Amino acid sequence: MKYTLVVISLMLFSTFAAAQDRVKIGFIDVQRAISESQSGKRARDKFQAQIKKAETDLLKEKQELERLKSEFDKKTPLLKDEERRNLEADLQKRAVVYQRAMGDQQQELQQKERVMTAEILKDLEKIVNEVGKNDKFTLILERSQILYSDQGIDITNKVIEVFNSRSKSK
């Protein structure tokens, strides 16, 4: 589907190009622009810190759960059946709570990553539009949609440079 859209776009573009004196095409590697820009690096560092905090919190709970399991295993021969069942049920409940907390943390982190990426993409889109207008590009494509291109039309470095200069001034 994506390639069909690209082919149709190129066909329309070629018709448009015939009507124009000069056609200027560029492409940008959005993922590289995000990962190499200062904003992207700051977002990645912030996100990594959030991951480490979440892992630390979950590790404490996991260690506590393992400690309780070990304690339970040691006490099992000495416990009455009802006490053993109650402790086992409590241990299982804590294990379920831990599993849910892990899943919730993962979903929360994924949501935060999506929000951070969306904010960067919004700013990046403005920069690409500005570079396109200033440098009189007819068309700027995203690198992942292109099977082959001359690297001379890659504007990723220029976009990163403008993006970084804007993020310094903020």
Image: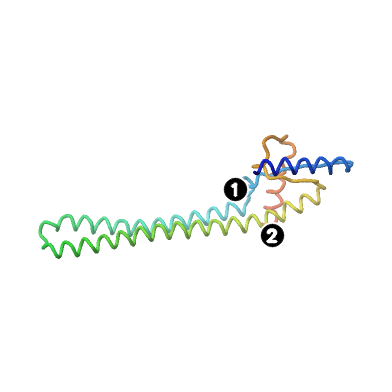
Q: Secondary structure at mark 2?
A: helix
Q: Quadrant of the N terminus?
A: top right
- The residue under label 1 is 35
- The residue under label 2 is 169
Q: Secondary structure at mark 1?
A: helix
Residue 43: x and y in percent read 56, 55
Residue at 72% x, 56% y is 126
Q: Quadrant of the C terminus?
A: bottom right
Of the image marks 2 and 1, the number of the one nearer the N terminus: 1
Residue 62: x and y in percent read 32, 56
The correct choice, above or below, for 36 with respect to 105 in the image is above
Instruction: Please give left or right for residue 97 compared with residue 24 in the image.
Output: left
Residue type, label 1:
Ser
Residue 27: x and y in percent read 71, 43
Per the model, the C-alpha gap separating discs 2 and 1 is 19 Å
Residue at 75% x, 53% y is 129
Give the quarter of the image for residue 19. top right
Instruction: Name the foreground residue: 64 vs 142.
Output: 142
Instruction: Please give left or right for residue 78 compared with residue 123 in the image.
Output: left
Instruction: Name the foreground residue: 111 vs 6.
Output: 6
Instruction: Name the foreground residue: 32 vs 144.
Output: 144
- Per the rendering, the mark at residue 55 is none
Give the quarter of the image for residue 156. top right
Residue type, label 2:
Ser
Instruction: Please give left or right for residue 35 compared with residue 88 in the image.
Output: right
Residue at 28% x, 58% y is 65
Between circles 2 and 1, the one closer to the viewer is 1
